Amino acid sequence: MNKVHITIDGIKLYVPENYTILQAAKEVNITIPTLCFLKDINEIGCCRMCVVEVKGSKALQAACVHPVKEGMEVFTHTPKVMEARKVNLELILSNHDAMCQTCTRSWMDCELQTLANKLSVENVRFEGDRKRLPLDIGVSIVRDPNKCILCRRCIGACKNIQTVGVIDTMNRGFNTVIGSPFGMKLEDTPCTNCGQCINVCPVAALHEKGDADRVWEALNDPKKHVVVQTAPAVRVALGEEFNMNIGEAVTGKMVTALRMLGFDKVFDTDTAADLTIMEEGAELIDRIRGGGKLPLITSCSPGWIKFCEHNFPDLLDNVSSCKSPHQMFGAVLKSYYAEKEGIDPDDIFVVSVMPCTAKKFEAARPEMQVDGHADVDVVLTTRELGKMIYDVGIDFPDLGDSDFDDPFGEATGAGVIFGTTGGVMEAALRTVADLLNGTSADNIEYEEVRGLEGIKIAKLQVADLELRAAVAHGLGNARKLMDAIRSGETFHFVEIMACPGGCINGGGQPLQLSDVRNWIDIKAERAKSLYQEDRKMFIRKSHNNPAVKKLYKEYLGMAGGKQSHKLLHTHYTPRKNYED
Amino acid sequence: MIKNIEELNALKDRALGNITVRLDRTENPSPEGGKIHILVCGVAGCASSGSLKVAAAIEDEIKKNNLGADVKVIKTGCFGLCAEGPIMMICPEHVMYTKVAPEDVAEIFENHIMGGKIVTRLLAGEKEYEEIEDRLPQIPFFAMQKRIALNNCGIIDPENIDEYIALDGYQALAKVLNEYEPDEVIDEIKKSGLRGRGGGGFPTGRKWESSAVVQDHEKYVICNADEGDPGAFMDRSILEGDPHSVIEAMIINGYAVGARQGYIYVRAEYPVAVKRLGVAIRQAEEYGLLGNNILGKGFNFNLEVRLGAGAFVCGEGSALMTSIEGKRGEPRPKPPRSAEKGLWKKPTVLNNVETYANIPQIIRKGADWFNSIGTEKSKGTKVFALGGKINNIGLVEVPMGTTLRQIVYDIGGGIPDGGTFKAAQTGGPSGGCLPAEHLDTPIDYDSLTKLGSMMGSGGLIVMDEHTCMVDLARFFLDFTVDESCGKCPPCRIGTKRMHEILVRITEGKGTLEDLDKLEVLARNIKASALCGLGQSAPNPVLSTLKYFRDEYIAHVVDKKCPAGVCVSMIKYKIDTDVCKRCGICKKGCPTQCISGDKNTPFAIDQDKCVKCGLCMEKCPFKAILKNA
């Protein structure tokens, strides 16, 4: 890469020529304030917060997208710059529902508030007409246009990254809003509920549909046996809600906190992940041996499932019929566990703490029930759990560690890595390889399916089979991979996760400010932590999980058998993109 | 199909014979295609005022008098004197008739066409020219004009490519393909000093060059015909009156920069322009002037029309390109410049209609010819759409450096009803006002910018003492707020706030603090809006604040609108000394807010008065005073 000489606030720099002014300034420890800019997701220079003076340009320039150039002289805090940033922020605030006291974002860091602080905005001089529009409340996602500041990051995530594109700018000028086609409610569109829009929103214009009230109600109902399960990705992110390090594993503290909140049992969804591997592994071997439809595509990610129902209905037969792990777990809890513990399934209330907003929609699907009992009663996001812990005054970072409850206390490393892209594939490979080879392999870290490359393709020799595997994360990559499959590219096994990076970056995970995300890859940090957790585990292969073995022995029979199918499998429905 | 330059020249000679009767330069009109040509403006203002009916009446009259062999009617482009439309001109003698009604046609035929006597009452301008040799230049409206961009408008039939070819059409293209290397074309344009006529005034040659130097096999040239300034219709007139000049220029542009595809982005609200462009492109394709191996020189170029849906912001280069790509028309930050990454992220040259209309003549007559017209830094001519409080509303083309006074008084015929010139607004919603003290400023790009306005695309609106400058600023902000794309906060919210403040002031609720806020907002929108349109949106406020601050002060401090425009501040009063107590005002008042009878003095109840002004209009004794 060629380098260029530039000057920022009098400091001389020599930086790669593909740098923006924003990047260059960071090199000399100047963080230029940004609002709409989110690295790789929204680079459109529209909010005018990062404006700087560039010698020779009459107007101020957006540092986030303005490339450096040999000899360029930049000034980042002249009076002209400072005034423009402040006036523009005041203008944004003048059309923002600034009821900060009651805002869902107020306990987390609101980027708008942070910026107002940073720019010393002490009053808003330019009050005037303000938009007052109805909220769009869905089963997973709530959009509040009155909080929206039109930074368009959500569009970047939905349209450009996920290629779902169910929200975009509508109307113009002061009447501009982010909306769905024909003003439809988001849930009536092909929205996948992935929640990536929430993750990138700097304010509270997008958030999950809150369900904590229903959980509190159950917890306070003496008749209810309230069971909670937590997905693998939650443990490497929950700490962030309490300003702990990004990706720091807090499994033990989390279990302690859940008990303190009053849950009767605290289970690990990882156990169900192992169960999923057993079922999906059996399905894969069955399809390979029996000449069934290939590739087999994973079904753990409900955002991906809805995406597939809308966009690839012709390939739905390729998708594994396995329910996602927490749904499997719910079904097992209201059958096997209920019988074993002698509790009426009607009195069991299953709460899933998930890194995911799409799981709220998934849990509400009519097919996700057995004998009239919904598998899962409430899905909470990692954020919602954090807020519950915060609300009752638990000092989370100071908590001691506890273990998950039996009879599902034991999980494996394979279950843990479900939370990251490539993890389901790797967990499956660990099991399928052993089952097909009839041995127990020691070398179980499949580097070729790890990492944040959008689409990962691996060829692996398993017994006499050269297994072709593909992994895609983020729906944009999923679309590319599915298009390739549709046009004839052949694989045996395909893992797809709706969110970029997988569940660790799910739509229900703790929000990190753009100021953090622009410089640190939070996906990589959280994934790293999951792989570390995997290494710490005594058992690292799903088929070796004693709890799972016991479950098959005592209740389910064989993987892929009749009882499994009743409890653990589901079916899919082709969906239209927009009604005619 | 014209296979080579020789064939083009042969066609030109043939076609010229058909129209020599319309040209000043010939003393002996050729009889081919009719001895008398009646040119009727068939576009814009004239079409609105009924010129097409006049043309039909002429056809009828030709038939009725069996004159088919001698008299021909041609629907042309704009003559410029739009306020006087429908306009017709009879050639060879070049007698112009104005405000012609279909009923006048029989008289024109009887007296002029067949009787050789001019119908004096329909003559344009000073109506004393009776002699047959009186020519256009003697009409003051035309005397000071110099037509380059509008050269063919009003002379040729825009739907007949042969007539364009007759007047040296496509000769510039032939010259370029025959004699010039691409970089030599650019050198010629650079030497001519031509600057962009769309508003910014960027040197056209340099713009072409910056795209030409980028190595890419896929490049584009685009004509910006999304003319959106309120009251501006220069580009429309060129497209409607002489579409081939733009097409020819675009082919030359493509050759010069290495592009093989061009787009004309024209607003859908210009249906005649769209239709004529379509006809012109088809004719050029049929003649092989568009397509592959143009004039046998191995150069390929194709042209397509793209319709704009009426968003002002799509006149901004990057928004226009986004719109062509089928996306929401919004500007993007620059760099990268369009010359490097424009349409479909490929090197793209974007020029305005009027800019292109100059190109063929620059090539034909040479850069030095063009260079000799205009001022030091602004060469050639500029077309202005004259509007507002001026007698000769219409289209004028003058050399750069012509003073505002010459345009307003000599060409425009001054202010109607003996009014006083107060200011001229140039540059549309991006421009500003020039007060009377600057009437003698020679107009060019730089002088206007220096005075806080801008050339813009060429709208020129004249205001008299009855125009309220605060209200004018409010009007332009109204437009800007409406047309903001909404991408960046300074424009999306900032212009809205400015507009709210201006409304407050015109309603008599403004404060001195509001003036400060206006200035803070204006300064920051100018500094930090994303695109050029946003950055220039505060100009109408800034320039009125600069030159007419007193008027703002009168509104906010004295709660008075000196021009008597802002309704909330108007007060009608009855001068009891003059009032004869006739009661006419009382009878006509729609809110019955006037009291009084024979014995009691008449008075207006200010709380009930809606300031309609009917009483003042009706009073036979001028006893009702406004803002006294």
Image (cartoon, rainbow, N blue to C red):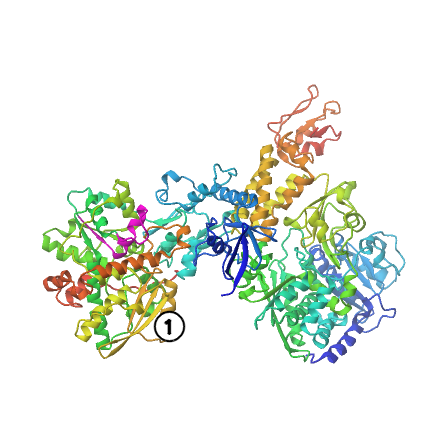
Q: In the image, B112: left or right of B182?
A: right
Residue B415 picture quarter: top right
Front-lying residue, B73 or B493: B493
Residue B564 in view, yes or no: no
Residue B138 in view, yes or no: yes
Residue B114 picture quarter: bottom right
Residue A100 picture location, percent across and down? 39, 40
**Residue A374 sits above or below residue B514 on the image:** below
Residue A434 picture location, percent across and down? 19, 72
Part of the protein shown in magenta? A226-249
Front-lying residue, B188 or A538: A538
Q: Chain of mark 1?
A: A
Q: How many marks?
A: 1
Please identify the quadrant where the C terminus of chain A is shown.
Answer: bottom left
Q: In the image, A138: left or right of A324?
A: right
Q: Amino acid at mark 1?
A: Ala
Residue B105 picture location, percent across and down? 79, 59
> Does the magenta segment cover residue A241?
yes
Front-lying residue, A4 or A95: A4
Q: Residue furthest top?
A: B599
Front-lying residue, B500 or B186: B186
Query: What SS does tag 1 mark?
Result: helix
Residue A107 picture location, percent across and down? 34, 42
For disc 1, the neighbor class at 10 Å (few under 14, some 14 to 19, many from 20) is few
Q: Which residue is mark 1?
A: A484
> Does the magenta segment cover residue A565?
no
Q: Residue furthest right?
A: B131
